[in-house]
Image (spheres, rainbow, N blue to C red):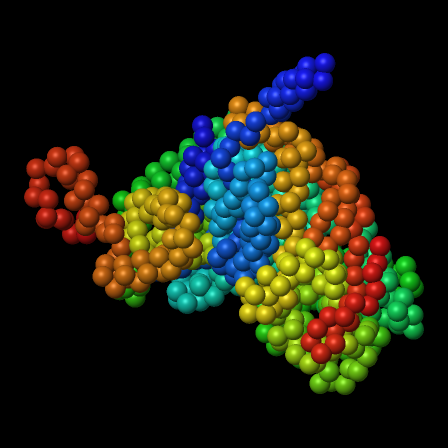
């Protein structure tokens, strides 16, 4: 496989997963940026386990995911039903704390970072196929789980909380437990990303996990569409990949293009390109449903 | 008999010429993975300018083996994701590359160059970031601990009465390692060193300076961002600090922002660096004037010569190892370039000649400067 394609596919998959990690809590109107910190924690933990303690990669992956989920759960005990603004502040603070801890931990290289993480297969090509296999397997698994969540009672409850938390609570939805569930789930996804990120590059630097990532994932969600998981799936590779095709002179304006796209979408199509209505219509078209394509049930909406 | 001699000589010369490897490229294209946009875009431009200046000079003098050289700036915008994809593109068919810049992109992209066995010259980072990728890069600087201890001790010896030194340290990439090397050098002189951490997002420096002054230091070393240093020196002066020679600025702090934010308040401060703007040789003078012309009269940025020299080192490697640019010999010629650069002897750099041994420079000088009227003046060369 060409190297370029490998890096494109792996980076795109990470961006999809991380956008989903932000999408999940946003189902209950939480912008949960702690995911970026969790990504760093899991990445460094797995790097340390495999690189220094020679723990097999599979166990390190599991440890990274479990630790991320635990952090997500513990934090959610305090902010499971907090207002959006409070969740944002906690997320940003957590990123700062995590970066500072990593910078001061000599065991993981401090500000220098970690170099030469071992390959997870005997040859470089084997390593790449293994990373791709694991990453896309996890992408499919997470995608399936999120799809099931979205189409379950919990998903509908999350939509109700997003629309009006007080009204949802009066209808019997436990907003706090729901918030805790999606926050923990999202941190688990971020843990997966952190471990895989470390083994894609086989090195780690604290500047791999900056606020820049928050900007990218926010753009993916809001341009793609925050009401379904499909927006992130389609938009993450496009927003990441298309600028690579631009001539160098245009690439320099990439951030401006991202920003302009975000503003335009927020003004002209506030729900993003992949709205729930659009997805249902598309599903009907593809499945050849006889039901009138423009008529959606209340449940589907 | 005489005629026969000339015929034989002519045939021999033709035969010799036909044996010499032919250049297989129309142009030597060298990609330069650089941060041309984003927060350090201005530094990226200074580095790019150095490489382009070398290419302009080389092309004006006939190119490399008669073919022009072209430096192709590849923007990574400090993004490791972008850096990895761009490096993956470059290693497909490039003979050699420059960069990446800066450290987080080095860590994401250099493993790709190493796997492809292609040299990429990381000429502005510290030894610690280059060494993991030997022999597919070279370090422009000796190991930090080895070099900086000696250099800072030279400053300490200028003020033997100093007993306690406070060091302002910002946690960024190689900077804490540089601070550790300073501690080692000063400790060997019997001085104690205390650390005051500078937060990366700090915008006011009064409390930090008060904290440092409460430790009653005899001298202060700055290991942080240039503009922060300028502002901290101002704070120190406003709180009664007068012994300016006992303030030492590390090499990465010797940037335009130090002079623009520090103004007249930094007069007397000592700075260490790896280049000496007062060198008087024709190449440096041309470089300096051209840089000033393109940058509104500003003196060359201290790292600008690095990629200038890197381009010349690649030129020398191509010329002296018989590299042809033939795609069929890509692997073999990549190795020739890497081997040559790792052990080059008597390389004629922009400022001084130096040798490399296994990818590490062995005899580069370092300098202490004093700032006077907003300009550096040479205080001492340290070898």
Q: Nearer the viewer, residue A233 or A256?
A: A256
| Residue B274 position by quadrant | bottom right
| Residue A25 position by quadrant | bottom left
Q: Nearer the viewer, residue B194 or A80?
A: B194
Q: Looking at the image, can residue A289 be seen? A: yes
Lateral position of residue A110 relative to residue A157, left or right: right
For the image, the number of numbered tags is: 0
> Quick check: B307 above or below B183?
above
Lateral position of residue A284 relative to residue A141, left or right: left
Instruction: List x then y, in percent, for residue B322.
Output: 64, 29
Residue sitting at x 78%, y 51%: B364
Lateral position of residue A283 relative to residue B79, left or right: left
Instruction: List x then y, in percent, for residue A280.
Output: 19, 45
Residue sitting at x 84%, y 75%: B218
Q: Nearer the viewer, residue A129 or A146?
A: A129
Q: Looking at the image, can residue A56 be seen? A: no
Residue sitting at x 73%, y 70%: B376
Residue sitting at x 37%, y 47%: A246
The C terminus of chain B appears in which quarter of the rendering?
bottom right
Instruction: List x then y, in percent, for residue B122.
Output: 63, 46
Instruction: List x then y, in percent, for residue A20.
Output: 38, 48
> Quick check: A79 above or below B329?
below
The N terminus of chain B appears in which quarter of the rendering?
top right
């Amino acid at each position: 496989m060409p190297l370029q394609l490998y890096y494109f596919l792996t980076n795109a998959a990470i961006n999809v997963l991380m956008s989903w990690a932000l999408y999940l809590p946003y189902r209950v109107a939480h912008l949960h940026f702690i995911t970026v910190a969790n990504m760093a924690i899991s990445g460094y933990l797995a790097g340390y386990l495999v690189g220094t303690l020679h723990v097999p990669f599979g166990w390190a992956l599991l440890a990274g995911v479990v630790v991320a989920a635990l952090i997500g759960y513990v934090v959610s005990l305090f902010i499971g039903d907090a207002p959006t603004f409070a969740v944002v502040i906690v997320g940003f603070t957590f990123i700062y704390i995590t970066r500072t801890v990593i910078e001061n931990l000599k065991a993981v290289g401090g500000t220098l970072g970690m170099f030469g993480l071992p390959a997870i297969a005997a040859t470089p090509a084997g390593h790449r196929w293994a990373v791709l296999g694991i990453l896309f397997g996890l992408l499919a698994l997470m995608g399936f789980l999120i799809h099931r969540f979205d189409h379950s009672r919990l998903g509908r409850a999350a939509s109700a909380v997003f629309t009006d938390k007080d009204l949802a609570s009066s209808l019997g939805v436990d907003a706090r437990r729901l918030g805790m569930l999606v926050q923990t789930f999202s941190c688990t996804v971020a843990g997966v990303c952190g471990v895989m990120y470390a083994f894609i590059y086989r090195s780690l630097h604290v500047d791999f996990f900056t606020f820049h990532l928050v900007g990218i994932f926010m753009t993916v969600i809001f341009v793609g569409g925050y009401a379904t998981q499909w927006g992130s799936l389609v938009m993450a590779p496009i927003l990441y990949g298309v600028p690579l095709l631009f001539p160098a002179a245009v690439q320099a304006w990439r951030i401006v293009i991202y920003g302009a796209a975000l503003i335009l979408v927020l003004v002209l199509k506030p729900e993003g390109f992949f709205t729930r209505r659009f997805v249902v219509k598309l599903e009907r078209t593809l499945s050849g449903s006889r039901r009138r394509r423009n008529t959606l049930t209340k449940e589907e909406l | 008999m005489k005629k026969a001699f000339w015929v034989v000589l002519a045939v021999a010369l033709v035969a010799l010429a036909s044996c010499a490897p032919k250049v297989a490229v129309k142009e030597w294209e060298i990609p330069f993975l650089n941060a041309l946009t984003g927060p350090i875009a201005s530094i990226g431009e200074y580095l790019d300018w150095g490489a382009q200046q070398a290419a302009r000079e080389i092309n004006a003098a006939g190119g490399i083996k008669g073919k022009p050289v072209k430096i192709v700036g590849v923007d990574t915008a400090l993004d490791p994701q972008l850096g990895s994809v761009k490096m993956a593109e470059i290693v497909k068919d490039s003979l050699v590359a420059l960069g990446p810049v800066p450290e987080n992109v080095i860590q994401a992209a250099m493993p790709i160059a190493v796997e492809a066995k292609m040299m990429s010259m990381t000429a502005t980072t510290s030894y610690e970031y280059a060494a993991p990728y030997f022999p597919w890069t070279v370090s422009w600087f000796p190991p930090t601990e080895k070099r900086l201890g000696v250099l800072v001790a030279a400053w300490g010896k200028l003020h033997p009465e100093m007993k306690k030194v406070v060091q302002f340290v910002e946690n960024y990439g190689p900077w804490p390692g540089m601070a550790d090397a300073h501690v080692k050098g000063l400790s060997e002189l019997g001085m104690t060193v205390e650390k005051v951490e500078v937060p990366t997002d700090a915008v006011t420096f009064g409390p930090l300076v008060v904290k440092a002054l409460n430790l009653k230091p005899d001298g202060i070393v700055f290991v942080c961002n240039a503009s922060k240093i300028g502002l901290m020196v101002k704070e120190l002066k406003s709180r009664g600090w007068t012994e300016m020679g006992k303030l030492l600025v590390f090499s990465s702090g010797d940037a335009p922002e130090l002079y623009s934010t520090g103004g007249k308040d930094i007069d007397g401060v000592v700075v260490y660096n790896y280049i000496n703007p007062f060198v008087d040789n024709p190449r440096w003078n041309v470089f300096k004037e051209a840089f000033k012309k393109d940058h509104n009269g500003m003196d060359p940025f201290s790292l600008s010569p690095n990629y200038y020299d890197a381009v010349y080192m690649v030129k020398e490697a191509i010329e002296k190892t018989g590299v042809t640019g033939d795609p069929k010999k890509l692997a073999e010629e990549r190795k020739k370039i890497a081997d040559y650069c790792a052990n080059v002897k008597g390389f004629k750099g922009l400022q001084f000649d130096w040798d490399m041994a296994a990818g590490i420079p062995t005899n580069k000088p370092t300098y202490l400067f004093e700032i006077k009227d907003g300009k550096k003046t040479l205080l001492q060369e340290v070898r």
